Image (cartoon, rainbow, N blue to C red):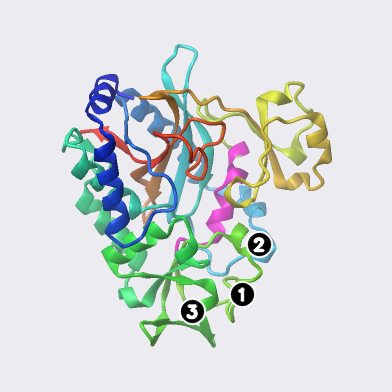
Amino acid sequence: MIESIRQAFNSAFTVEQYADFLNDLHTEFGYVIPFRVAETPVFFPETLAQRLFEASADIVKVLTQPDFKALSAGAVPPAFHVPGETDHTLFLAIDFAVCKDEAGELTPQLIELQGCPSLYYYQPWLAQKFKQHYPLIDDAFSVFPGEMTEAAYYELLKTEVLGDHEPENVIILEIEPEKQNTNIDFLCTEAKIDVKAICVSAVIPEGDKLYYFREGVKTQIKRIYNRLIFDEYAQRTDIRGPWDPTMPADIEWAGHPNWFFRISKHTMPLIDSPFVPKTWYLDQLETIPSDLENYVLKPLFSFSGAGVMFNVTREDVDAVEDRSNYILQRKVQYAPVIATPDGQAKCEVRLLYVWPEAAAEPIPVLNLVRLSKGDMIGVKYNMEKTWVGGTVGFFSK
């Protein structure tokens, strides 16, 4: 989005260069990434970067207020409540659409937020690959915000994922991890800290202790880096083993599952900020807006965007049976702000945070970007188009 850098990048770009870049991504781990990786990173202008962190500060203010747990008490479905909840989330992801304000300036608008991990190991690896293959992206650019360095980032993440345990006593918990689109992140994680991704069905309970087989050796699990999404877990009734995450166990959580629900779409009506579109709990909305075409109807809990309605009608609202599970959100207008050889692309930015146990608030550490030329934002959409997909954003240092 920095015009001079965008022009220079586009002018220097070649299809062969991109093919070499993709080949490198797909061969390092002997694994073909199943989602589309965009041809380009995004270069954040300073004013947009400032607004992104201003917007995040408004959100963090709500998450750190003393009564947040009380306000989010109804967010965790009783059937998915996991014992041993921590005082706050360890991981935080905040998704913003890049829009334009009335003055034509770039500005973020909140789309969603999540109290769970994202691609914390894949994104810096991807950023490094961009730097290796595109000489324009030198050390004047960093995927890490502020004073965060790559070394400091990996040390912080290692500390928070492992805790006081050896890597063999820590697992990534998922559903059939090798089949997940995010498997590339699990491979990057294992390469960095030797922690393996394990299917929830492969966890073995013995009393209050948990075990798994690591290279054929029965090994105790003492800490879980949780990547399991309970919405998906509820749907996958074929994936059940002797242990369920809601069962008490003598373990620590690196990212307690309850925070997936507490910090989610459920949080959006609690935030009053110019960077957050007006949002209501449907069951608390006294008057239905007359201009429903300007709103989005979203279930509070759904896997990978399922059930979201964009062209909302009064009939859609009236047809909702469980209104307590829905929000009505003012529609956000993404701006086509990324110039590409075959048209403008829209941009969504996910800011990633780590919140150590003793810290007063979460620390911004990383970002993830998705580019789109269609109505839907996400790496599983626009697969037939170019200059779209998953990527990273670089800050100027």
- Tell us which disc is closer to us: 2 or 3: 2
In this image, 396 relative to 121: left or right? Answer: left
Q: CA distance from mark 2 to mark 3?
A: 27 Å
Name the residue carrying label 3: 250
Q: Residue at x 53, y 56 (%)?
A: 259
CB atoms at circles 2 and 3 under 8 Å apart?
Answer: no
Element marked by disc 3: loop
The answer to whether any part of residue 67 appears in the image is: no
Q: Amino acid at mark 3?
A: Asp
- The residue lying toward the viewer, choosing from 333 and 70, is 333
Residue 14: quadrant of the picture: top left
**Where 272 sits versus 261, above or below?**
above
Name the residue carrying label 1: 240
Q: Residue at x 42, y 36 (%)?
A: 388
Residue 386: quadrant of the picture: top left
- Tell us which disc is closer to us: 1 or 3: 1
In the picture, which quadrant includes the N terminus?
Answer: top left
